[in-house]
Image: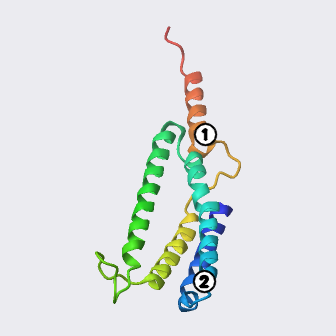
Amino acid sequence: FAIQLMGFFMMTVFMLGLAVPYHHWTTPGNQIGFVVMYAFTFFFANFGPNATTFVVPAEIFPARLRSTCHGISAAAGKAGAMIGAFGFLYAAQDPHKPDAGYRPGIGVRNSLFVLAGVNLLGFMFTFLVPEANGKSLEEMSGEAQDNEDQARAAAVQPSTA
C-alpha cells in the first residue's frame, strides 16, 4: 500500500517537474537533466505501481477465483500499457508541425501534464484497494468464515445414515 502510494506520488511530482519548466529542459545543455528526471519517473513506476501489480491481485481476490482474476488484472494492465504508449505517441505530436503520418496532437508538455493527472488518479484510487493487514488470504476473502459456518451447520444436522 505504502509502496504504491509513494510510487504514484513521486511519479506525479517528477512528471510535473518535467512539464512545468518544459522549455528549460528543451534548451541546449539541459537535455541530460530531462533524461535524469524521466529516469526517476520510471524508477518510481517500477518500484511502486508496477511491483504491486503482481502482489495486490494475489492478496485481494477470493481463493476460488484468484488465478482467473489475476489473469484478468494482468491483461487489463497490459492493455492499459498499450493504450498509454500509443496514446502518448499520438498526443505528444506537435500541434503545429506533427511528424509525417501523424495528426496534430497536444504536444509533449501538455502530454506530461495529462500523465501527471493520471498518476494523481492512481494515487487516489490506491485508497480504494483493500489492505491485507496481516490477514490470511482466506480471512481477506471471507472464506474462513464460510468454512466455519459450514462446519457448524454440519455438526448441528443429525446424520441420516
Query: Disc 1 marks which amino acid?
Result: Glu
Residue highlighted by disc 1: 138
Q: Judge depth for marks 1 and 2 and give the one in front.
A: 2
Q: Is residue 130 visible?
A: no
Q: Is residue 12 above or below residue 66?
A: below
Secondary structure at numbered mark 2: helix
Tell me which residue sits at (57%, 42%) in the image. Answer: 142
Residue highlighted by disc 2: 17
Q: Could you say which quadrant of the image residue 149 lies in? A: top right
Instruction: Indicate the position of residue 52 as horizontal and vertical percent values.
Output: 60, 55
Q: Could you say which quadrant of the image residue 146 lies in? A: top right
* For residue 51, side relative to residue 94 (left or right): right
Instruction: Indicate the position of residue 19 as horizontal and vertical percent values.
Output: 54, 85
* For residue 143, side relative to residue 133 (left or right): left
The residue closer to the viewer here, 33 or 67, is: 33
Tell me which residue sits at (53%, 13%) in the image. Answer: 159
Instruction: Indicate the position of residue 89 as horizontal and vertical percent values.
Output: 40, 72
